[in-house]
Amino acid sequence: KSISNRGGGIIDFLCANKLTKNTALIEIKTPKTKLLGSQYRSKVYNISNELSGSVIQIANYKNSLLQNYIALKNSSEEIFEAFNPK
């Protein structure tokens, strides 16, 4: 996906810190997204499939950003860095 929000998978927001220009990836889920899964033991619960899927999804976006950083930066008018994005 390009910085201009065209092509590829969709992330909700890609932000850059005003001072450092380092990026942050933001994936938003609805308030109805389940956080907890089934009970594992007494008062201990697994995380939900939706939550674990979200973590994997954002990790994949981060990996894609890092792999394509040079091409994205060269094709963008925006100034940004991608040093271990949060």
Image (cartoon, helix red, strand yellow):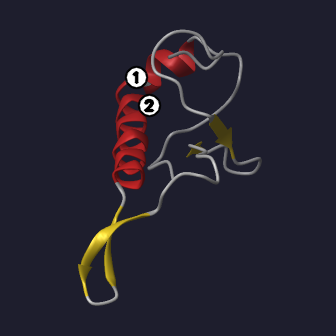
Q: As displayed, is residue 7 above or below residue 32?
A: above
Disc 2 marks a residue whose amino acid type is Leu
Q: Are marks 2 and 1 in contact (CB under 8 Å)?
A: yes
| CA distance separating discs 2 and 1 | 5 Å
12 left or right, relative to 46: right
Farthest residue to the right: give it.
Answer: 18
Residue 65 circle label: 2
Which residue is rendered at x = 51% and y = 9% of the image? Answer: 7
Residue 76 circle label: none
Residue that numbered label 1 is attached to: 68
65 left or right, relative to 41: right
Which residue is rendered at x = 64% and y = 54% of the image? Answer: 31
Q: Of 12 and 14, which appears nearest the observer? A: 12
SS of the residue under disc 2: helix
In the image, residue 43 lies at what x, y percent?
34, 88
Which residue is rendered at x = 32% and y = 76% of the image? Answer: 45
Number of dots carrying numbers: 2
In the image, residue 33 lies at what x, y percent?
53, 52
In the image, residue 34 lies at what x, y percent?
48, 57
SS of the residue under disc 1: loop
In the image, residue 36 lies at what x, y percent?
41, 66
Q: Of 70 and 6, which appears nearest the observer? A: 6
Q: As displayed, is residue 43 above or below residue 34?
A: below
Farthest residue to the left: give it.
Answer: 41
Q: Tell me the quarter of the picture where residue 70 sits.
A: top left
Disc 1 marks a residue whose amino acid type is Asn
Q: Of 71 and 45, which appears nearest the observer? A: 45
